[in-house]
Image (tube, grey):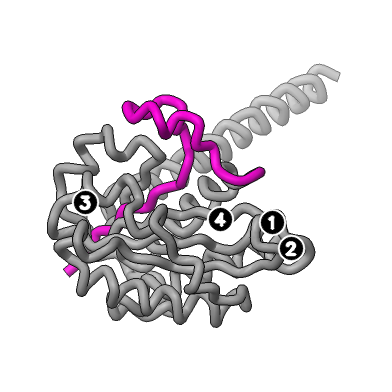
Amino acid sequence: MIAKICLQAGHQNCQYNSIVALRRSTGAPNEMSFNVDIRDQVAGELRRRGFDVYTTDANANDDHNITSQDFDLFLSIHYDADIYGRGGGFVDFPDPQVDKATQESQRICKDIEEEYFKTTDVVNRSERRNANTKYYYMWKYLTAKTPCNIIECGVGMHVPDDHSLLHFNRPRVVEGIVRGVCKAFGIPYNQEPPIPPFDPCEELKKQNGELSEQIKNLETRVTTLERGVVMASNILQKLAGN
């Protein structure tokens, strides 16, 4: 079974949200561009591993395509503001009162938490879980069967540790998240890309294209030979006239 994942870039396009209070929620400094970049890279890596991935912005609550279907995971990507005096991140799941899929949400959260912090060396600050993450606005808009997590990847502007990683070593951030999702769904992180199934029609198209190219090359060579024959004939005629 192919796991269906929805990835949200936190704060992206929030100024257009139907919830007026969210329109000024632009996130920490430089966070929005980070969220978008990491979401898109994670999406690409998960697709390479066979996941069915949807991407969305802060207005997912207004998108019927997101709110009307069951996902195997909805993951919202963020980073924290530098308000703690030190770095660190955390992964959280909704309060069970607002999440009917809480067992699955908690199971996935544990796997992402374990792999992300082990891969990135960001310090796990699970004590920072709070009402804003436990009751994140999206939770009530998702279907009852959709487990959901939110990840604060670190403190984006805390120099040097989290800032250096989140802004200059994003492949590790992406790897940490992808490893966590893969572990949660039993998909090997390291795997050869799947061999596409044999399609006779595509094979014929390929062969036809190759033959067409060969014919063009032959036509070019024939044209060149014909020009050579004409030039040789002209030369012989001139010599015969002399």
Q: CA distance from mark 2 to mark 3?
A: 50 Å
Q: Nearer the viewer, mark 3 or mark 4?
A: 4
Is residue 6 located in the magenta-colored stretch of the structure?
yes
Image quadrant in which you'd find residue 233: top right
Secondary structure type for disc 2: helix
| Disc 2 and disc 1 in contact, CB within 8 angstroms | yes
Disc 2 designates what residue? 164
Q: Is residue 172 above or below residue 231?
A: below
> Mark 3 or mark 4, which has the lower sequence index?
4
Q: Nearer the viewer, mark 4 or mark 1?
A: 4
Disc 3 designates what residue? 201
Q: Judge from the rendering whether residue 78 lies leftward or rightward of residue 203; answer left or right.
A: right
Please, what is the three-letter code of the amino acid marked with disc 3?
Cys
Image quadrant holding the C terminus, namely: top right
Disc 4 designates what residue? 79
Please, what is the three-letter code of the amino acid marked with disc 2?
Ser
Residue neighbourhood size for the residue with mark 4, other residues' Cα within 10 Å, grouped as few (<14), some (14–19), many (≥20): many
Q: Judge from the rendering whether residue 22 lies leftward or rightward of residue 221; answer left or right.
A: left
Secondary structure type for disc 4: strand
Please, what is the three-letter code of the amino acid marked with disc 1?
His
What count of labels does the image hold? 4
Disc 1 designates what residue? 167
Coordinates of residue 206 in the picture (x, y in percent): 35, 51
* Magenta segment: 1-30
Secondary structure type for disc 1: helix
Q: Nearer the viewer, mark 4 or mark 2?
A: 4
**Extreme residue toward the top, this view:** 241
